[in-house]
Amino acid sequence: MNGGGVDERLQLQAAVRRDPQDFLAWVMLADAELGAGAVAAGEQAAVRALQLRPGHPEALARLGRVRWTQGRHADAAQALREALRQAPQHPGIAVWLGHALEDNGEAEAAAQAYAHAHALLPQEPSIAAYLLNWRRKLCDWRGLDALSQQVRGAVRQGHPAIEPFAFLNEDAGADEQLRCARNRAQALARSLAPLPAAQVRGDGALRIGFLSNGFGAHPTGLLTVALFERLRAHADLQVHLFALNGDDRSALRARLQAAAHAWHDVAGQPHRQIAQRIRDTGIDLLFDLRGWGGGGTPEVLALRPAPVQVNWLAYPGTSGAPWIDYVVGDAYALPPTLAAHYSERVLRLPRAFQPSDDTRHVGTPPARRDCGLPEHGTVFCCFNNSYKLGPRSMARMLEVLRQVPDSVLWLLSGPGQADDRLRAAAAAAGVDPTRLRFMPKLAHPDYLARYRQADLFLDTHPYNAHTTASDALWAGCPVLTCPGSTFAARVAGSLNHHLGLDDMNAADDAAFVATAVRLGRDPAARQALRERLQARRADSGLFDMRGFADDFAALLRDTASRHGWEGAGST
């Protein structure tokens, strides 16, 4: 990651003023501006470099980075392909081409680009990590163990370039996850000078900020919108939403805008400008709703725009960052035994940490045959993203199919040839590949309705179903999971626990398979389970967003009071 250090940018800006013909300075300035989130300035620098040396691969590569950052993925891929054609031995260009091809929907070509970069620099752990992560998405398990061991070894050695979000897919402990995040955070902290310290206001309404690139038709928007709507009832709290993503014109975006006391469109702005906007708004508590996930801006948080900063919801692990004070969880997802592996102070809600939209209507699904499903037999499903479907998760699902005659496994269709690879894995395990059925990505209401045609959701390990588990349970489909030892491996278990369905939290893989087989063979038991879920959905509090808002507001007030706030009515 290039943090776009202020000193470096200023020096390069001065260099191109002194010598406007300095090609290398323009190339380096493009990198520095992009690293600082200054996309327009980065574009100007890249274009100037190309004017000085038309067609130069380094300049083309920077233009490709600019276009990728702007969301112009086809243009990015075109520029980076040409750059790599001219400089085929340049691993950095190959990596950026992989990024552009990913987002342009050219999944298999992206894998080839990462593999090309890895062949050029096989000992570089960041490139190994990109290849590993993308192979997981493509369900291409060749060399997975060796790549994973290389990446985990790099984390142990303090390598800062391993993406913490992708690292959640590795079967690593919470201590390794902390080390990975801390490596990344320390490198970023060294490149940025934070704003002067600020204090929580002593009185008046608390200003609560939420920073996310998911304020729209996105899992984050889906999970939070009803909470924000309910928080309007708390007069001593003001919700400020800072949107890193542009307007997708979705109904969710409109609801989020209406729910907020103030809406701040900061898409495409430089990191320091966003941080100053947050500071000028007088935010007391700032929630990072992206963390180390793609599209997030940890650089903004590292600038310390708010006196209290909190990691919650979107990144299911520790930030490892000195600029994050607290993390919000619950006693199941983040038990006391995990706290030692968190850099933040732990705040726990007295309910599941994950909110949901309790206003959603679950419609009538198409007939089974119209969903590509058999008319009879048990339908197991798992609509998690393909990168969560690792060898261990698929092995236990296929074992369930072997033991439950006439059953099928309904999966979300993955990128590239992922579906074909999963069919091949089924055949290799002795399971008829036609028993794997695939659902294309659908609009949320259509996707949600299809859970009514599924009998049981089979979860993944080590990265659980999170939003998908909430979706399944809301739609009335029970979720079977095997909770692990990290936050990311305990979210579905937390939802079941707070529903009073702890019997759906298997102790190990053998128990997972045994429970799935028992339910798969027993229609009466499945019906009884659905009825229990329906009853608990209504009375457990898991989907009670008014109650969630009350508990969340209490957590906000308590946290602010630790930092000097005496209440909205104090004088």
Image (tube, rainbow, N blue to C red):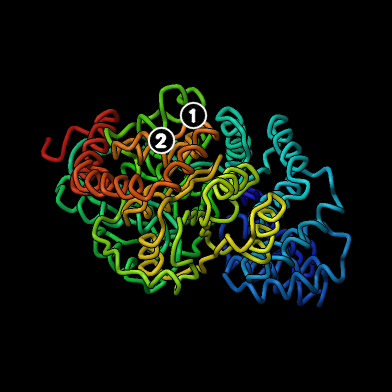
Report x, y in % for residue 97. Answer: 73, 65
Q: Earlier in the sequence, mark 2 or mark 1?
A: 2
Left or right of 265 in this view: 509: right
Left or right of 282 in this view: 73: right
For residue 542, say whether it is visible: yes
Q: Dot 1 corresponds to which residue? A: 342
Q: Residue at x 49, y 40 (%)?
A: 488
Looking at the rendered structure, the kind of residue marked 2 is Val
State the quadrant of the C terminus: top left
For residue 311, say whether it is visible: no
Looking at the rendered structure, the kind of residue marked 1 is Tyr
Report x, y in % for residue 34. Answer: 62, 60
Q: Dot 2 corresponds to which residue? A: 327
Mark 1 lies on a secondary structure that is loop
Q: Quadrant of residue 55?
A: bottom right
Verify CB contact (< 8 Å) between mark 2 and mark 1. Answer: yes
| Label drawn at residue 16 | none
Q: Residue at x 46, y 47 (%)?
A: 465
Front residue of 488 and 194? 488
